[in-house]
Image (cartoon, grey):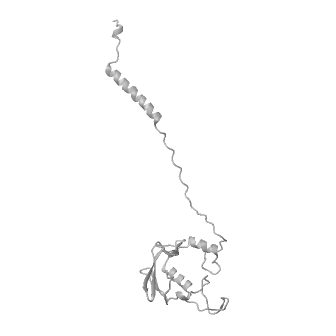
Amino acid sequence: MHHGLNDVPRPTRRRRGAGRLIALLAAAGVVLAGCSAAEPAPAPEKEQRTSLTLGVVGELTSFNAATATGATAANRAVSALLDERLGSIDGSLQVVPNDGLGRITRVQGDPLKVSYELFTDRVWSDGTAVTLDDLVFGWAVSSHFFDDATYDVNGQVVSGTRYFNTAMPADPNARTARPIVDRADDTLTLTYDQPFADWN
């Protein structure tokens, strides 16, 4: 059967519309693909710092700046950075308590009685627990309570015993009775012989 020119099948309006829609969607996809931003490169991971370098004037000769031979300017500077204390002095010469290590409390003023409390779970750098025994030892060293030494004009011991070779001599204004230790509350209480401004 012969078909005339007018008999060739043509797309209907619906087909034309569907074809146009597909073409538009395809074109839109190309445009969107061309305009969309590229995926950002992952941020480089920051290097984890494991050391801190500081400079001090002088040569480090000892980590114990509390001894007569170790109390150099350089050793004291390093000690101030490494050693944790119950309190420190700020730029305005005010005492700043270290609330992470313990607490110092003025219990009464006459006679002056001061309580030193250690918080639990504190350890030395080797993992050994910080205990009241450390506070008692620190008191014995700094107070010179057990010393019975006498000295000549040059500061040399001429009789008796000085048990600890500390950098600081005994402070006559800081004399106390033997401390009271309460292990249940982790406190050490000192009663001073007389008023003492630097109790904290």
The answer to whether residue 111 of the structure is visible from this angle is yes
Depth check, front residue: 49 or 173: 173
Residue drawn at (49%, 43%) of the image: 40
- Residue under the point 44% across and 32% down: 31
Q: Position of residue 59 (x, y in %)?
A: 67, 71
Quadrant housing residue 53: bottom right
Up/down of 158 relative to 75, above or below:
below
Q: Decide: is 6 above or below 114.
A: above
Quarter holding the N terminus?
Answer: top left
Instruction: Find the residue positioned furthest to the front.
Output: 92
Residue at screen point 41% across, 29% down: 26
Q: Quadrant of residue 162?
A: bottom right
Residue 177 in view in this figure: no
State the residue in front, 110 or 14. Answer: 110
Residue 125 lies, in percent from the top left, at: 54, 71
- Left or right: 58 in relation to 191: right
Report how many numbered discs are placed on residues in the image: 0
Q: Is residue 149 left or right of residue 95?
A: right
Q: Is residue 10 left or right of residue 74?
A: left
x 46%, y 75%: residue: 102
Q: Quadrant of residue 32?
A: top left
x, y (%) of residue 166? 60, 83
Q: Position of residue 74 (x, y in %)?
A: 64, 72
